[in-house]
Image (spheres, helix red, strand yellow):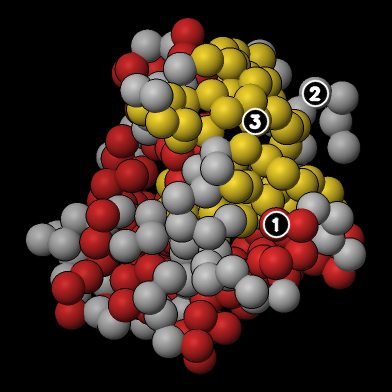
């Protein structure tokens, strides 16, 4: 663990008029750490993720990020162009619906390769080689490099989206319900892949999900959200095995629909 967190959120708040999206959320995320965020629909977890990943500007609070060069920057003090560059290089964003994170009209290889081109890669052979490598890493047959994503299954599309995000060796990846809508067997395979990749690559990751099984398998620490606020936080096994807040207890016992 380094002395400076990779990401620091302090009193992060997002309001939609008088309605609370998220309020006074604070935490530190360390390099290589996986943080899970759980709660029922409307709890504020997606709003929080959108703020953290610079997709949505908060109404208050602060998000600090420590860059590769060691400089700590205020995310929303950066220009829009600087934030976009950060998302293409040091960050990744895996969306719940892979169709929102892929270009469906270009090939699988082009989906992976264009992110390399966005950071300056120009040699066609190198780009194609990297694309083949990452398709293989995500258990996609490299011979399908020229196939369109629309011809892939949902699970393969999600794996392709992850490959697209990892090709530039990001330090931090945001995941919004990465196994949502997939069959149970496909979910298990994808979770195994995500767990292996976060471990082997030393990735920091923030995963938003309603599925407690996902966070138990992947995350080191857990935030439980209700009504836009964090009602409980701690080590994942500790929170799930011995929840202290009544809402967390109801989630764990599946009394509340999630």
- For label 1, the residue is 247
Q: Secondary structure at mark 3?
A: strand
Q: Secondary structure at mark 1?
A: helix
Q: Is residue 253 left or right of residue 182?
A: right
Residue 49 picture location, percent across and down: 50, 41
Residue 148 picture location, percent across and down: 17, 71
| Residue beneath the point at 31% across and 77% down | 154
Q: Earlier in the sequence, mark 1 or mark 2?
A: 2
Q: Is residue 202 left or right of residue 112?
A: right
* Residue mark closest to the camera, 3 vs 1: 1
Does 180 appear above or below 245?
A: below
The Cα atoms of the two marked residues, 2 and 3, are separated by 19 Å
- For label 3, the residue is 25
Q: Earlier in the sequence, mark 2 or mark 3?
A: 2
Circles 2 and 3 in contact, beta carbons < 8 Å: no
The Cα atoms of the two marked residues, 3 and 1, are separated by 17 Å
Q: Residue furthest bottom?
A: 185
Q: How many marks?
A: 3
Comparing 168 with 88, the one in front is 88
Does 7 appear above or below 148?
A: above
| Residue beneath the point at 53% across and 33% down | 22
Residue 194 showing in the rendered view: yes
Q: Earlier in the sequence, mark 3 or mark 1?
A: 3
For label 2, count other residues whose C-alpha is less than 10 Å away and answer few (under 14), some (14-19) or many (20+).
Answer: some
The Cα atoms of the two marked residues, 1 and 2, are separated by 32 Å
* Residue mark closest to the camera, 2 vs 3: 3
Circles 1 and 2 in contact, beta carbons < 8 Å: no
For label 3, count other residues whose C-alpha is less than 10 Å away and answer few (under 14), some (14-19) or many (20+).
Answer: many
Does 204 appear above or below 153?
A: above
| Residue beneath the point at 18% across and 79% down | 151
Disc sitting over residue 4 in the figure: 2
Residue 132 in which image quadrant: bottom left
């Amino acid at each position: 663990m380094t002395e400076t967190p990779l990401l620091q959120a302090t009193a992060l708040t997002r309001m939609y008029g008088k309605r609370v999206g998220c309020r006074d959320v604070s935490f530190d995320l360390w390099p290589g750490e996986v943080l899970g965020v759980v709660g029922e629909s409307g709890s504020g977890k997606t709003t929080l993720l959108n703020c953290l990943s610079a997709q949505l500007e908060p109404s208050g609070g602060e998000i600090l990020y420590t860059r590769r060069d060691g400089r700590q920057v205020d995310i929303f003090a950066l220009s829009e162009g600087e934030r976009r560059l950060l998302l293409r290089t040091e960050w990744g964003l895996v969306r719940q619906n892979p169709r929102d994170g892929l270009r469906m009209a270009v090939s699988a290889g082009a989906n992976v390769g264009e992110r390399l081109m966005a950071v300056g890669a120009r040699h066609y052979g190198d780009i194609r080689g990297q694309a083949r490598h990452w398709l293989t890493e995500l258990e996609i047959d490299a011979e399908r490099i020229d196939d369109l994503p629309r011809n892939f299954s949902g699970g393969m599309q999600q794996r392709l989206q992850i490959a697209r995000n990892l090709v530039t060796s990001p330090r931090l990846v945001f995941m919004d319900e990465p196994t949502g809508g997939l069959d149970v067997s496909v979910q298990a395979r994808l979770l195994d892949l995500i767990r292996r990749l976060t471990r082997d690559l030393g990735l920091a990751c923030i995963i938003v999900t309603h599925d407690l099984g996902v966070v138990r398998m992947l995350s080191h620490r857990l935030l439980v959200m209700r009504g836009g606020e964090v009602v409980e936080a701690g080590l994942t096994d500790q929170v799930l095995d011995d929840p202290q807040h009544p809402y967390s207890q109801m989630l764990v016992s599946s009394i509340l629909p999630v």
